[in-house]
């Protein structure tokens, strides 16, 4: 029986491309942290774990649809955004940034190669890219949510196989869950699955997940658990499992690689899901290769020379000025922009609140006032971008106007803990568009800094102890220096000394994961239906956990409470109201200097491929191309 579930669909590949989509910098090696979620109280989990393991599950009817009506019926043949008759064969070569030293994408140790999660490891359910809240059965053929909402049971497909031909069993699912929730895996999994207490094998093909509390999306989250073979890990320390060939159930396996240089995946000729509706017309290339580049200029020239065949461009200057020449003119290279309806989330210059320098909200607002986006968009970005005005930009989830209705009711509960401006002023990013000007913004910034105890004397802005205001912005892409330089000059006019430097991608990843920075450019990607991942982004419990996505170090009890309101919202209306309230509180606290986003994907490729006629709605171009394109027939 084909099963499907409505709810939130997120995965690491989507997180990767969402992170790319919001601006001109690229952080390929970091996006695997974007779904980090804070762990809840251990005592609560232990109590619920004991109770659930002793109790018989309360099983409801098989879940054909939960929430909204699904787009696809139970007997659908393929997704609309694929070509079910696409030819198979050929090779697809893409670029990757930096380097890699691991084939294990599930640990904090090392930098994993690109493509592993997408191509090798499958989940119980598969997301639909033309619906915001749907999942359909992949490894699982059926799913049952308990009537009390405290457990979900998945039934595996009998034909599901790992790449070495061994059947996928419920024991592998439980082993994967237990391993990833253990201390040797990346902490993001412990955070994200905090409310999933345990996995219990009912028989070889049936596994039940027990929940600590009722949560409208936990059954969806369980469906996203990546499954790998027990015999891949054996009894070895998981975080030391770096270069052993991974064993997953996906359409590809690792064929060959050279650390830091390239990795090639080859399609499994006996892939078990070749004719499955959620895989029909997908993963058509015989080989997929990622070539690594440390320099953006070298990467671009390599593309033009044919070293690789597809690029997703994030640098507005390069897109406007460098994607031109005879090969573009005669059609050998195609340059296109593809519209999307992705939630753009938020990108910004993030303050590290663990630094006393940034503890005062007035100081953070003053620094934000020195950012002249209008000038940058006109002079540097060729008017390609829109300013982020929400942590959920480009979606109905963005707060607007003044709070009303259910959102206002939620905020009223915390009035004594919130600035009055949350209720009386619409938050907007600092602007230099008329009637505003940079001069007026800097005057306002100076007043805020003085109010916070910072005054200009002896050639610098100093506090009462005479300490100068100095901080550093750490970057991962040299091209971003042209954006930071004018920002630093504006801050210099206030007496603030800003240093900035570009570091290697691996060093950058480590510095962010250990919170060893003053300010960085960071992306908070969002799904169409936010939930548990917000714990890792904004909840105080994740602020001091290395590797979490609470990069700024936010510790705010109102934010904590509103995150819980989002996660446990009873319906879409409640969720939207809670997200609006959360968004408004985050914005008024000035935790970052907002950057920008673009509502289209900028893609260039050699004219060697074909693509489906129908575009999905919610997608990233890298995963979309890898998954649905095919090689152009040779005449």
Image: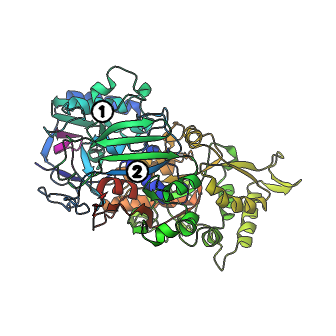
Per the image, is 138 magenta? Answer: yes
In front of the other: 469 or 419: 469
The structure residue drawn at horizontal position 14% and vertical position 45%, both measured from the top left corner, is 60
* Residue occupying the far top of the picture: 235
Residue 246 placement: quadrant: top left
* Residue occupying the far bottom of the picture: 435
The structure residue drawn at horizontal position 47% and vertical position 59%, both measured from the top left corner, is 21
Tell me residue 575's x, y (percent). Answer: 36, 58
In front of the other: 452 or 78: 78
In this rendering, is residue 255 above or below 290?
A: above
Return the residue at label 2.
93
Q: Can residue 145 be seen? A: no
Main SS, magenta residues? strand
Quadrant containing the C terminus in the rendered view: bottom left
The colour mode here is rainbow
In front of the other: 284 or 607: 607
* Residue occupying the far front of the picture: 635
Tell me residue 204's x, y (percent). Answer: 15, 30
Dot 1 crowding, Cα within 10 Å, few <14, some 14–19, many 20+:
many
Give the SS element for disc 2. Answer: strand
Mark in front: 1 vs 2: 2
The structure residue drawn at horizontal position 14% and vertical position 39%, both measured from the top left corner, is 159
Which stretch appears magenta?
Answer: 137-155
The structure residue drawn at horizontal position 66% and vertical position 43%, both measured from the top left corner, is 355
In this rendering, is residue 135 above or below 542?
A: below
Nearer-N-terminus badge (1/2): 2
Q: Please indicate whether residue 156 sits to the left or right of residue 217 in the image.
A: left
Return the residue at label 1.
247
């Amino acid at each position: 029986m084909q099963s499907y579930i409505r709810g939130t669909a997120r995965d690491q590949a989507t997180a990767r491309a969402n992170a790319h989509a919001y601006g001109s910098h690229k952080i390929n090696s970091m996006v695997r942290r974007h779904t980090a979620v804070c762990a809840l109280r251990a005592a609560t989990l232990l109590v619920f774990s004991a109770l659930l393991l002793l109790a018989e599950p309360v099983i409801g009817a098989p879940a054909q649809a939960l929430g909204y009506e699904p787009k696809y019926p139970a007997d659908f043949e393929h997704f609309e955004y694929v070509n079910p008759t696409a030819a198979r064969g050929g090779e697809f070569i893409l670029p990757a940034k930096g380097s890699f030293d691991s084939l294990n994408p599930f640990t904090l140790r090392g930098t994993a190669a690109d493509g592993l999660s997408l191509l090798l490891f499958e989940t119980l359910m598969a997301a639909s890219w033309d619906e915001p809240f749907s999942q359909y059965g992949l490894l699982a053929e059926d799913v049952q949510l308990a009537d009390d909402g405290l457990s979900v049971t998945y039934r595996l497909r009998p034909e599901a196989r790992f790449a070495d031909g061994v059947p996928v069993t419920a024991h592998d699912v439980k082993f994967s869950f237990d391993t990833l929730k253990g201390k040797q895996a990346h902490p993001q999994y412990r955070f994200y699955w905090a409310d999933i207490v345990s996995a219990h094998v009912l028989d070889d093909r049936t596994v039940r997940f027990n929940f600590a509390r009722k949560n409208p999306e936990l059954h969806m989250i369980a469906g996203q658990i990546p499954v790998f073979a027990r015999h891949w890990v054996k009894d070895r320390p998981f975080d030391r499992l770096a270069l052993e060939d991974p064993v997953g159930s996906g359409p590809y396996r690792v064929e060959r690689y050279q650390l830091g240089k390239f990795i090639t995946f080859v399609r499994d000729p006996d892939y078990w899901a070749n004719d499955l509706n959620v895989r029909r017309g997908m993963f058509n290339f015989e080989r997929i290769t990622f070539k690594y580049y440390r320099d953006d200029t070298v990467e671009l020239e390599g593309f033009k020379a044919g070293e690789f065949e597809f690029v997703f461009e994030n640098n507005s200057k390069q897109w406007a000025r460098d994607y031109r020449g005879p090969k573009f003119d005669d059609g050998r290279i195609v340059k296109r922009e593809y519209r999307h309806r992705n939630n753009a989330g938020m990108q910004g210059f993030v303050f590290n609140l663990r630094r006393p320098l940034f503890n005062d909200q007035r100081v953070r607002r003053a620094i934000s006032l020195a950012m002249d986006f209008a000038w940058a968009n006109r002079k540097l970005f060729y008017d390609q971008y829109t300013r982020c005005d929400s942590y959920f930009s480009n979606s109905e989830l963005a707060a607007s106007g003044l709070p009303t209705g259910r959102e206002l009711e939620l905020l009223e509960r915390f009035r004594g803990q919130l600035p009055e401006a949350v209720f009386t002023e619409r938050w907007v990013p600092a602007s230099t568009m008329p009637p505003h000007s940079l001069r007026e913004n800097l005057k306002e910034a100076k007043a805020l800094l003085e109010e916070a105890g910072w005054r200009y004397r002896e050639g610098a802005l100093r506090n009462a102890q005479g300490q100068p205001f100095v901080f550093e912005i750490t970057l991962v892409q040299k091209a971003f220096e042209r954006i930071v330089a004018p920002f630093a000059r504006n801050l210099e006019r206030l007496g603030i000394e800003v240093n900035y430097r570009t570091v290697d991608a691996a060093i950058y990843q480590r510095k962010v994961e250990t919170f060893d920075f003053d300010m960085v450019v960071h992306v908070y990607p969002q799904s169409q239906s936010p939930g548990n991942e917000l714990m890792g982004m904004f909840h105080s419990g994740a602020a001091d956990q290395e590797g979490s996505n609470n990069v700024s170090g936010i510790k705010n009890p109102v934010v904590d409470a509103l995150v819980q309101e989002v996660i446990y919202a009873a319906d879409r209306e409640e969720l939207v109201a809670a997200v609006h309230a959360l968004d408004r509180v985050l914005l008024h606290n000035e935790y970052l200097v907002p950057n920008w986003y673009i509502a289209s994907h900028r893609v260039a490729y050699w004219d060697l491929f074909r693509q489906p006629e129908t575009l999905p709605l919610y997608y990233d171009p890298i995963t979309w191309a890898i998954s649905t394109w095919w090689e152009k027939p040779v005449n």
